[in-house]
Amino acid sequence: MPIHVTVWNENRHEQRSEKVRDTYPEGIHGCIAAALRSDSDLEIRTATQDQPEHGLSEDVLQHTDVLTWWGHLAHDEVEDRVVERVVRRVWEGMGLIVLHSAHYSKVFRQLLGTSCSLTWREAGELERVWNCAPGHPITEGIGRYFELPQSEMYGEPFRIPAPDEQIFLSWFKGGETFRSGCTFRRGNGKVFYFSPGHETYPIYHDASVKQVLRNAVHWANRPQRSSDSCPMVDPIEPLP
Amino acid sequence: MPIHVTVWNENRHEQRSEKVRDTYPEGIHGCIAAALRSDSDLEIRTATQDQPEHGLSEDVLQHTDVLTWWGHLAHDEVEDRVVERVVRRVWEGMGLIVLHSAHYSKVFRQLLGTSCSLTWREAGELERVWNCAPGHPITEGIGRYFELPQSEMYGEPFRIPAPDEQIFLSWFKGGETFRSGCTFRRGNGKVFYFSPGHETYPIYHDASVKQVLRNAVHWANRPQRSSDSCPMVDPIEPLP
Amino acid sequence: MPIHVTVWNENRHEQRSEKVRDTYPEGIHGCIAAALRSDSDLEIRTATQDQPEHGLSEDVLQHTDVLTWWGHLAHDEVEDRVVERVVRRVWEGMGLIVLHSAHYSKVFRQLLGTSCSLTWREAGELERVWNCAPGHPITEGIGRYFELPQSEMYGEPFRIPAPDEQIFLSWFKGGETFRSGCTFRRGNGKVFYFSPGHETYPIYHDASVKQVLRNAVHWANRPQRSSDSCPMVDPIEPLP
Amino acid sequence: MPIHVTVWNENRHEQRSEKVRDTYPEGIHGCIAAALRSDSDLEIRTATQDQPEHGLSEDVLQHTDVLTWWGHLAHDEVEDRVVERVVRRVWEGMGLIVLHSAHYSKVFRQLLGTSCSLTWREAGELERVWNCAPGHPITEGIGRYFELPQSEMYGEPFRIPAPDEQIFLSWFKGGETFRSGCTFRRGNGKVFYFSPGHETYPIYHDASVKQVLRNAVHWANRPQRSSDSCPMVDPIEPLP
C-alpha cells in the first residue's frame, strides 16, 4: 500500500521573485514533490497556501499519511482552524516533515510548545551537514556528511525542547553550528525538523537532501491511527 | 531573596456552589496560598480570572518567579494575549505548576503541544499517590506514598509528550492508574503537572499535597532569566 | 524478508520445579517461541543459558534481528563477554525485548545505566495493564486494558532513566502501580521492557501478552545496521 | 553549607610528559581544583588514580557532593569495584562532571549505556563553543560563544543516548561540529559531560571553561540523598 504524502508550500516567494522561479520553476513544492515521486512507494499530491482552506481540507488530511510543510513569509496568514486540523491529525498519527523557515510556522510552534527561535544569516556560505545517527532510517544512504555549497546559515541557540533524536548537526563556514535534523513525537505523530532549504539557493535540488526527504517520509509514516478523545468513564466493574 | 509566587485560580466554582465555598472558604487560591505562606522563603500573591487581565498583567508576571495555575470551567475564556504572556514568561524562565483540571488549560496545552486528554470519574474514591522519585526535590519529606481518601479519578491514556521525569504515579481504588506528577522543560522554564485536586474534595487541605506544592515551587524556581529573541546575525569576523 | 528472532531463557526454574514445568512444559522460551511463531513474518529460534556461550555465539547474534530475554535466578552467571556481545549488537541495531525479572539482568542494567531496582510481592493478585499509547505499534489490537488474574506485583519506584515512551502502566489489586511497558533507544537499538511474566503464573499463555510480544518484535526490528566504531579522522580537505 | 567537590584525575600524562607538566605544573587536577577554589561556596579535594582505591574510598565518596572526572590513558586500569562505588553514589544523588576524554571512562559508559564513541583529531585548531542554553545555570556568565584557539577536535557521531539538555555545541575550524555540553540524569544523580579539555592544550586555564566548571558543580549538586534499594514488600493493608 502506498504512503500518501501531501507536499505543502506557502508558494509566495514564487509569485514575487523571478530568481525564485528560476530556481524552482514548478515551485518549491513542485521540486520536493518530484524528489518524492522518484520513490514508487510514495503517492504524492501538493497543496499551497492560497488554495481554499490552504489546500488542506478535512478530506485531504484524512487521506494524508505524511505532510511536508514549507513556509516563510506568511505564517500569520495560515488560518487557525487549519492549523488546529493539522495538529489534530498529527496527534492521531499523521507524520509531519517541517522544512527550513517553517521552524516559525504556527503548526510547528504549537506542536513543540517553545518559541523555535534561532539566529540566521543569508550569505550563501558552505553548510556541511553531519550525520549524527548512522544506522537510523532517516540517514539511510547518507555518508558521514554531505555539503551544500551555498546555504543560509541557521544558528544556535535553537529554542526547541530537547529532541528525541539528534539526526543531523550542521557546520557553517562562517563559524556557526546548528541542530539541523531533529525528531520529536507528539501524540501518535512523528515529527522531523530539517533545516536545510531556501527559496533561492537550490537546496532541494541536492541529491542528499532529496534522499533525506524520502527517508524521512518512510520514517514518519505510521500505519496505525488513533482517535485522541478520552471521555469520562463509568466505574469499572467490581474486581475479582 | 524570597521566591515570588503568584497563585492563580479561575475562581468560578467558588461563586456558584455553596459546597465549594464550604470546602474552600477563601477560594482554592486562598487555600493554596496559605499552604505556601507557611514556607517563609516564599512571598505569595493571588490572582483570579475575573480580575482585569485575569490578574496577570505584564508587571505581575515580571515579578513572578513561579506561577501556579488552577482552572476548570472557563479555560476558553482566558484571553489569548494573556496566555501568550504567560507562555513567554515560562520560556524566559518562570516556573509553572499546573494543577488538576488545568491539564486542559490553554497555557498547558500550548506548552506541551499535545491534547492533554485523559479519562476521569467523579466517585470520591481512594487515590494512593506513589513516590516514583525518592531523593528528588519535589518529593522531599514524602514517604513511599500518601493517600487521598476521596479523590476524582484521572486515568490513562494521558496524552502528553514523554515527561522528563516521572515523579508520582497514582493508583485508584476503582481500578485505574495515572501519571499524576510529571516534569517538563520548555525554554528556560520548568513545568510541573500535579493531578490531585478538586473543587469539592478537600485535596488542597491535605498535608502531603501542601508539602508537594511547596517543594515544587522551590524546584521550579530558577534565578536566571533569558530573553528568547534571536535576531539575524552579522557574519562573524574572519577566523584566526 | 522474515524477522529473525532469538528467544533467550535462563531456563533454570524449569529444571528445579515441577510447578514451573507444569505451567511451561516446553520452558518459558518454548511458550514465548510458540506465541511468536504464530506470526508468519517471524522466524524463531531459542537459546538458553546453559548452552555453550549461553546459546548466543557471535554467529547467532549476527543473524538475530530481535532478541527476547528472560532471566531471574542466575543473572550473575551470565558471562561478561556474552553480555558485551549482546550490548554491542543492540548498539548496532538489534532489537531487545526485556521481560519481567530480567529488569535485573546484566544486559538491561548495562544498557540503561541505572540500578533498575523495584519493589515486588508474590501474592497471585490481579494485574490490570493499562494501554497508555493507543495507536502505538506495540499496542495494536490491545484495547483500553487487559487483565492478568494472577500476577506477581512489581511496584514503584522503578529506578530507570525516563522512558522514551510510556506504553503500559499496571494497576495491582493490592494497591500498587508500575511502569510495566517502557521503550528506550540505545545506539541504533530499540529496547522494550515489559514487566508481566512469571515462572509459575501462566502469564505467557495470555492472549494479550502474546499479542504485545509479537507487536514488540515488529516495533523493535530495524532493517539498517551500523558499526559503532569512530576512528581518529584525518583533517578534512581545505574548504571551498 | 559548602558543596564538597572531589576533583579526580588519572594523572598519568603528567608523569610521562614534560610538555604536560609545563602546561599543568600542579597536574590537570591541580588546575581544575584551583579554578573551583575561586568559588568560596565550594570545598575542594583532589584524588588521583594511583592512590589506594584510586583515592575514592567509600568515605571520600560519602563526603563528596560533586565529583569531576578526567581520564585518558588508563581507563581500563580503573578497578571495577571503584567504578561500581562511584556509579552507586551517582544513583544516590552525587553530581558527576565528566571531562573530555573521559567520554570513554568506565564510569561514563556504564551510566550512559552506549559506546560513547566519537571521532577526533589533534591538530591544535580553533574550537568555538556555542551557548545553546542561555538562561541555564551551567551557562551563567557565558555569552553567545567562547573560543579556544588551540583545541583537540571531537566530532560526530557521538554515540550517546539523547541528552536531556543540549548546553553547548562546538564548531571546529577543520570542519566538524560536536555536542560538547550535554546533561543526563541517572537515578538521583545529575551528570554533565563537557568535552573541551586536553593534556597539552591549556584548555583548563581558559576563563570561560573555568566558569562553566564552577557553574556545572552548582548545577549538579543536589542536597537530597536517597538509597537505591527496593526490598520485597508486604501486602499493603486492606483498603478503606
Image (cartoon, coloured by chain):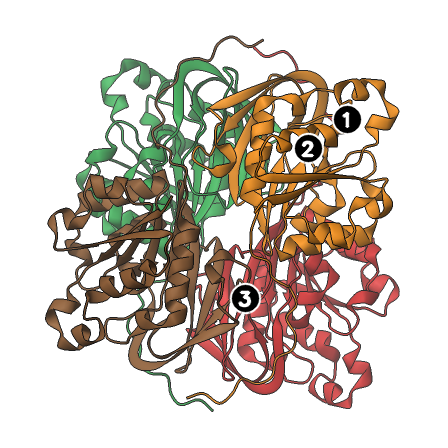
Chain colours: A brown, B green, C orange, D red
Q: Position of residue B68 (x, y in %)?
A: 37, 39
At x 80%, y 77%, the residue is D12
Label 1 with label 3: CB-CB less than 8 Å? no
Q: Residue at x 22, y 43 (%)?
A: A60
Give the numbered dot on residue D181: 3
The residue nearer to you, when weighing C70 against D203, is: C70
Q: Quadrant of residue C62?
A: bottom right
Asked if badge 1 and badge 3 are on a common chain, one would say: no
Give residue A191's position: percent from left, percent from top: 38, 51
Q: Chain of mark 2?
A: C
Q: Which mark is residue C26?
A: 1
Q: Residue at x 45, y 74 (%)?
A: A146
Q: Which mark is residue C33?
A: 2
Marks 1/2 in contact by CB < 8 Å: the verdict is yes
Mark nearer the N terminus (1 vs 2): 1
Tag in front: 3 or 2: 2
- Tell me the SS state at disc 1: loop
Q: Is residue D237 rendered to the left or right of residue B1?
A: right
Three-letter amino acid code at the position of disc 3: Gly
Task: Where is residue B14? Give x, y as percent.
Answer: 27, 22
Do marks 3 and 2 share a subunit?
Answer: no
